[in-house]
Image: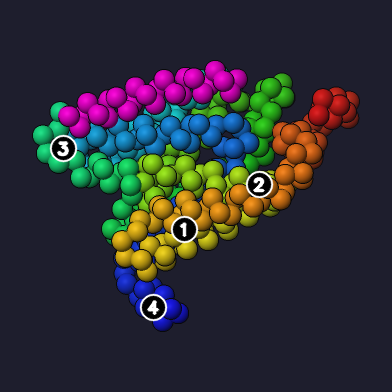
Amino acid sequence: MFHSIMGLYHFQFIQNALLSGIFIAVACAVVGYFLIGGGYTFAGHALPNIGFAGAAGAVLLGIKPVYGLFAMTILAGAAMSAGGREVRERDVSIGVVMSFALGLGLMFLSLYGGYGERVYSILFGTVLGITRNNVIFTGFMGLGAVCLVLFLFRPLLFVMFDPIAAEAKGVPVGLLTMVFLVVVAVTVSLAVQVVGALLVFTMLVGPGATASRLTHRPCRAILLAALLGVAYMFAGITLAGLSGDWPVSFFIATISFLVYMPVRIFFRGKAGRAPVSCRDIQGHMQRCFLNSREECKKRAAQC
């Protein structure tokens, strides 16, 4: 078995898949933590489906599907920032937009006379068909997304977990939310190449949800989520390469589920002590933004 695994890593397409997978796993873990904390998980599910419509429209126009994928997801991410602060109101808006985009995608496919193989690859991913140029592009964009999120770490953490208090302190909530959702859109467009639009939600939510149950400190949770994401990706690609027929996305989703469920069960008490927004406000964000002692006491009393 060991020799089979080591022999598998000698293939160029496996190396390309692993390298691009690592970049994508780290980017998904970083943005996924904020996605969960800010209540934007449904947006993480909707953006890949919206990107499918963009890919279908690009094929209809005779251009590469990836261009339509990026364009549609980025526009949708920017539009979602105006969906409202209430989770219910925001999810309804996102659901309506996603349904409309899926309808457009089906119409574009029906108008396209040929076989939409390139479009269907967006749904299921083509990790074993990634070239070295794709790896370079994925690495550049993934690192750019991570660096931008880390650069905006403190205000973004404040906005995602308590937008009302952030706005009261003069933080540009709308602008930061729009920038973050555009970064999510770029990350989704990159991840679609590996796991496909149907299961990109796994990489965005799985590692971050597991890490958030194991630690309440934002930096530790993000680091742990990145390590988990890389492990899921590495194991999924390896198992898919050894099996020969089974898809990579199946293994990644299965591993993510099998890791999350025990953590969910056995760490239920620890995660249930206080809402995540209150824990972070009492700790990291109070030190960064709430300079007045009276305001700190007021926010702590609300928690």
Amino acid type assigned to the residue bearing label 2 in the image = Arg
Question: Measuring 39% from the left and 37% from the top, which residue is drawn there?
Answer: 48
| Residue bearing the label numbered 2 | 264
Q: CA distance from mark 2 to mark 4?
A: 34 Å
Residue 88 included in the magenta stretch of the image: yes
| Residue bearing the label numbered 4 | 4
Mark before the other along the chain sequence, 2 or 4: 4
Residue 52, x across and y down, in percent: 31, 36
In the foreground, 35 or 283: 35
Q: Is residue 238 above or below residue 2?
A: above
Q: Is residue 288 visible?
A: no
| Residue bearing the label numbered 3 | 62
Mark before the other along the chain sequence, 4 or 3: 4
Question: Measuring 27% from the left and 25% from the top, which residue is drawn there?
Answer: 104
Secondary structure beneath dot 1 equals helix
**CA neighbours of label 2 inside 10 A, class few (<14), some (14 to 19), many (20+):** some
Q: Is residue 288 above or below residue 265?
A: above
Q: Outermost residue toward the left?
A: 113
Secondary structure beneath dot 2 equals helix
Q: CA distance from mark 3 to mark 2?
A: 46 Å
| Residue bearing the label numbered 1 | 233
In the foreground, 288 or 204: 204
